[in-house]
Amino acid sequence: MTTTNAALRDWVADAAKLTRPDRIQWCDGSQSERDALIELMLARGELITLNQETHPHCYLHRSDPSDVARVEHLTYVCTRNREDAGPNNNWMDPAEAHRKVDALFDGCMHGRTMYVVPYCMGPIGSPYARCGVEITDSPYVVLNMRIMTRMGVPALQRIERDGTFVRGLHSIGDLDPERRLIMHFPEDLSIKSVGSGYGGNALLGKKCHALRIASWQARDEGWLAEHMLIVGVESPDGETHYLACAFPSACGKTNLAMLVPPATLPGWKVWTIGDDIAWLSIDGEGRLRAINPESGFFGVVPGTNPKTNRNAYEMIRRNTIYTNVAVTADGQPWWEGLADGKPARDWQGRPYDPANGPAAHPNSRFTVAASQNPSYSPLTEAPEGVPISAILFGGRRRKVAPLVYEARDWRHGVLVGAGMASETTAAAVGKVGVVRRDPMAMKPFCGYNFGDYWAHWLNLEGKMSKPPRVFHVNWFRQDNDGRFLWPGFGENLRVLRWIVDRCAGRSGARETPIGFVPEPRDLDVRGLALGEDTLGKLLEVDPAAWRAEMDDIAGYLDDFGNRVPDTLTGEQRKTRAALG
Ligand code: SAT
Ligand code: MN
């Protein structure tokens, strides 16, 4: 197999000249290709067969212990003008970046197979979908890309028809963290990633293409590429609202996307469209619509059990690639929070010893087809996507942020998104639990200057006939003893219900300086063992804490200098003044 597209043919030839693989394999996405890759990886010890009786067609991959998360400090956006990448990105001059990274690619595929992986982000027939090709020497990446994207022949055909594609060159290199770089060249729609075989560093369709490169493309073309799940909430009378929700990595996007309604809310249904990325476009009628560019889930495993996320728990019992979980004596996957069984070997394959830390790595992951999810929505395949009623922003905040509030309007909503902050998680290398500003949950993923990004968000308002309402949620508020005030998981539907009722003009709220907050009576908490006092704390807006928050946001916006739109600083001043 090769291609009629000359640009693709030439690029593959150039990549081969640089990396010098033993052979080149064009991936067609077939079952037999997948089976052969699994055989190869089993033979090389790169995959381990899990218990096929309890977990049919499930395998375990152990990544290098130094290669278990995204590496934000080694991730660069390389634009001709440094200001275009902005203070939110590491920057390198493109010529220098190519020189540096090409030195690491030089001869790196010697003795290896080079896989050419054509893929499509979004339903193949969707006008909103975009294609790419990843060149990689990792069979693990190929297997994952086959689940996470529409990979193979149909994607190649679309590339040959459209003539455009994002180029992603990837090699695991020698896995030396000192020789690891994730480079983006948005001006020529290309990516070069070397030295890591893990998740967002290596599956280039995901964060590198569908967020960093796509956010740049989206700005040029008038749409948005966002770090958002997409979920449909259907009321007992059959009305469905679709919500697009931005939360940082490992803050519960997958759980919210496949929420299981509690027995106390009969008749409500939840439909999953996506759990990580949304591409949002304005249709001919001025409505904001979303597609999920991915076709699978690369979700955090620890904590998954029938109580926290029954859908995910059931979904990952077959046809799943596990990365960095522990195993039981009879070969079943095991992780912290699983509720039963016990680990025999930890994520590094060592006999389990609690002195070595958790058995499963805190950022261990499952890769599984979206269609296996019990709450899968068939509209995931709809070329036109789904209409969005509301946008939700949120993060992990012990303090300050109430359970939920609604922005006054779109512009204020952009400030609410820009002012987001969250405690860091194990999804990226670095300290866990530190509050950092993470605008729109895009801090690690926006491929251009945040100032320009906020301006783009604000500009979209005039193009929409009815902009979605904007909300902020926080499931993670704690009392002074460090206990979570809100039960979370399925019970979050109570908050979603208030949100969809707001969209339909049915539920009340009180106006505060930070926006509309429900009164305790506006939230349906029947059947929850939640004191009046607890609900009060969850919905509290403390003016002193919020004055400090707004001042911190002002300081943060200042870092972006004159690229910050006046409308945004105006919204910040308005809120700050209202707080006294
Ligand atoms: O490793 S990934 O970037 O794919 C997961 C995440 O951080 O959201
Ligand atoms: Mn993510």
Image: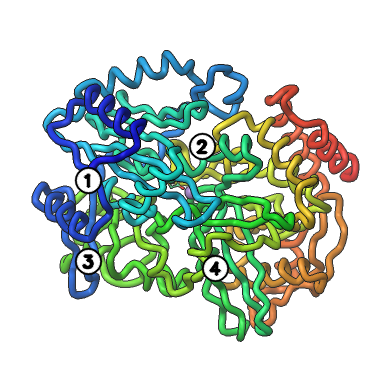
Q: Which mark is residue 489?
A: 4
Q: Which residue is found at the position 31% from the left and 51% from the top? A: 152
Q: The residue tagged with tag 3: helix, strand or loop? A: loop
Q: Could you classify mark 1 by the number of other residues whose Cα lies within 10 Å: few (under 14), some (14-19), or many (20 or more)?
A: some
**Above or below: residue 337 compared with residue 157:** below
* Amino acid under disc 2: Arg
Q: The residue tagged with tag 1: helix, strand or loop? A: helix
Residues at circles 4 and 2 in contact by the CB criterion of under 8 Å: no
Tell me where residue 367 appears, x and y as whole percent. Answer: 34, 57
Q: Which residue is found at the position 28% from the left and 22% from the top? A: 104
Q: Which mark is residue 212?
A: 2
* Amino acid under disc 4: Phe
**Distance (Cα) linking label 4 and label 1:** 35 Å
**Distance (Cα) linking label 4 and label 2:** 29 Å
Q: Earlier in the sequence, mark 4 or mark 2?
A: 2
Q: Earlier in the sequence, mark 4 or mark 1?
A: 1
Q: Could you classify mark 2 by the number of other residues whose Cα lies within 10 Å: few (under 14), some (14-19), or many (20 or more)?
A: many
**Distance (Cα) linking label 1 and label 3:** 17 Å
Q: Which mark is residue 139?
A: 1
Q: Is residue 396 left or right of residue 495?
A: left
Where does the N terminus fall, quadrant-wise? top left
Q: Which mark is residue 469?
A: none
Viewer-side label of 4, 1: 1
Viewer-side label of 1, 3: 1
**Above or below: residue 568 compared with residue 179:** below
**Above or below: residue 505 compared with residue 183:** below
